[in-house]
Image (spheres, grey):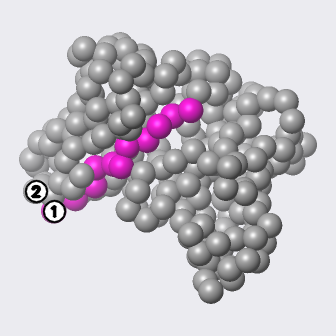
Amino acid sequence: GAGVSQSPRYKVTKRGQDVALRCDPISGHVSLFWYQQALGQGPEFLTYFQNEAQLDKSGLPSDRFFAERPEGSVSTLKIQRTQQEDSAVYLCASSLVGGWGDTQYFGPGTRLTVL
Amino acid sequence: AQSVTQLDSQVPVFEEAPVELRCNYSSSVSVYLFWYVQYPNQGLQLLLKYLSGSTLVESINGFEAEFNKSQTSFHLRKPSVHISDTAEYFCAVSDRLGFQKLVFGTGTRLLVSP
């Protein structure tokens, strides 16, 4: 079956512009995670959804970052007034239930470059 | 809070040689442990995980990892590597409670040469 997909795969934007990154999780997966991976680093947690509820947003770096999953399926990560330090690969992952060591399946990521 | 240390940023090895990628973690609570692999231009894929039971876990492509609670380690090993094993390997932990966000190490790049 289809895995997690993300779009766009690459996004180049100018400082100060807004961007929206999309994640399509595996169908039927309840849990959805966003991670940020800076160059040469491991992924870092941003936020978590269980269905449409955003249960944890403790990893969002600033109030310029906003995520939503209005119908409990597709999720969008929005970054307002982008800064150069926002340049990174943004990874989306989904899991069937979340918890109990459930496997997270990752998408290919969106590479964001802020000029 | 948890943290993961992967001391080796890069490990060069010849084909058919054995390899060990080191992972140590710090946590005040019990954790689940994971190894993910990222092949060039691909997303992260789960390689293996430790949840409970036998401390030695194996993957389908010959990798194994052993959970050592006293040393807080979860090193990844393979007795004989192939060129195709060239990739970035990430160790990760998650809390056993709640929704289990993953905390990753900085990764180890395995470079297999002929």
Q: Are marks 1 and 2 in contact (CB under 8 Å)?
A: yes
| Residue at image location 10% in from the left, 56% down from the top | A14
Q: Which residue is mark 1?
A: A115
Q: Residue B74 has which mark?
A: none
Q: Quadrant of the N terminus of chain B?
A: top right
What x and y, as percent, mark residue A64?
22, 36
- Chain bearing tag 2 is A
Q: Residue furthest front?
A: A1
Q: Is residue B95 above or below residue A14?
A: above
Say which of B61 and B102 sits in front.
B61
Amino acid type of disc 1? Leu
Say which of B87 and B106 sits in front.
B87
Q: Earlier in the sequence, mark 1 or mark 2?
A: 2
| Residue at image location 35% in from the left, 36% down from the top | A2
Disc 2 on helix, strand or loop? loop
Q: Is residue B8 left or right of residue A32?
A: right
What x and y, as percent, mark residue A78?
20, 35
Q: Residues within 10 Å of mark 2 (few under 14, many from 20)?
A: some
- Chain bearing tag 1 is A
Q: Is residue B99 above or below residue A92?
A: above
Amino acid type of disc 2? Lys
